[in-house]
Amino acid sequence: MRKMLNYNVPHGKLNRGMAVIETLKAVVERDLTEQETFLASALGWCIEFLQAYFLVADDMMDNSITRRGQPCWYRVPQIGLIAINDGILLESCIYRILKKHFSSLPCYTRLYELFHDVTYQTAHGQLLDTTTAPIGTVDLTRYTMETYDRIVLYKTAYYTFYLPVACGLEIAGITDGAAYKLAESVCLKMGRYFQIQDDVLDCFGDPEVIGKIGTDIEDNKCSWLVVTALSRATEEQRAVIEKHYGKSEEEDVAAVKMVYREMELEGVFRDFEAESHSGLMKEIEEQTLLPKNVFLPLLGKIYKRTK
């Protein structure tokens, strides 16, 4: 158990977990007490346990090779399908931590329900992802921006951005429903921007920097790149994508990437990135329900990231 936890939980960027502490600091607008720091940290680790659970399962479904600069957990010798049960254990740790440290607090039930709700949403996003683009079956007619946005909303945005902020608001004692609605609105937009970044990095990022070997093309993923490419492609470019997308040979992957480069999709992404950042900054600056620093550090960490 110790080996499994140490292998899967602590080696990411920890942005989700740290965002709980940063949110709480932003709301109370002072240095945190030792107890506040502990509680925010405990919730941050709960999110990192949830992230680890999702990644262990996702890597198996995608037949991925590396994660965070090391072999995916199921590929470690003598692990294999045991990783399924390890994922269940990772999730169960969340509720043991919540019970041990939060059961006497007024926010306990809301936190408990929050983690269950976000797990439910994320699992549905994963289901949309895997059923829209099953490995081995390529149906490019399914790859629309509407479908992509639904996958991103549920698979990534809720647990990566809204969950940490909502946790910070809960332990800060915020009960105003409008504040949570605002947080949800901003966080879901950040989540979409973040996932589109991730899709671009999967294709064009350096595996040594991002910590994994991108496999979206081989895995037939409904990614922002292929959806955007299909909406702009000539007949010849579409034919290349139809012939090579979802295949694992190097020449197939190279052919799809060549089309992406011909269409200058990295430049299209840069334009989208600038527009998204501008829109988010405007929404954050104009709202008055929550301190701006609830959102600005989160946005700062993902803007123009390289990993």
Image (cartoon, grey):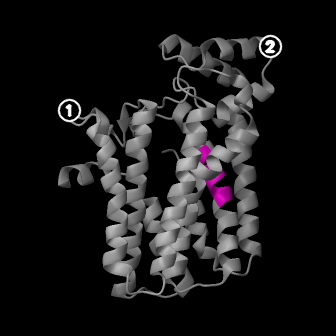
Q: Quadrant of residue 174?
A: bottom right
- Which percent across, then down, holds residue 10? 31, 56
Q: Is residue 289 left or right of residue 26?
A: right
Give the dominant element type of the magenta stretch: helix, strand or loop: helix
Residue at 54% from the left image edge and 38% from the top image edge: 201
Q: Is residue 28 above or below residue 146?
A: below
Does the image show residue 45?
no
Q: Is residue 306 above or below residue 296?
A: above
Provide the residue designation for mark 1: 77
Given residues 150 and 203, the one toward you in this image is: 150
Of label 1 and label 2, which has the lower sequence position?
1
Residue at 26% from the left image edge and 48% from the top image edge: 7
Which circle, 1 or 2, is nearer the viewer? 1
- Which percent across, then down, holds residue 263? 73, 24
Residue at 39% from the left image edge and 40% from the top image edge: 211
Residue range in magenta is: 188-195
Provide the residue designation for mark 2: 235
Residue at 66% from the left image edge and 32% from the top image edge: 225
| Type of amino acid at the residue the image marks with label 1 | Pro
> Does the segment drawn in magenta span residue 191?
yes
For disc 1, the neighbor class at 10 Å (few under 14, some 14 to 19, many from 20) is few
Q: Quadrant of residue 51?
A: bottom left
Does the image show residue 15?
yes
Given residues 222 and 211, the one toward you in this image is: 222
Q: Which mark is residue 1?
A: none
> Does the segment drawn in magenta span residue 37?
no
For disc 2, the neighbor class at 10 Å (few under 14, some 14 to 19, many from 20) is few
Q: Is residue 180 left or right of residue 28?
A: right
- Which percent across, then down, holds residue 109? 48, 78
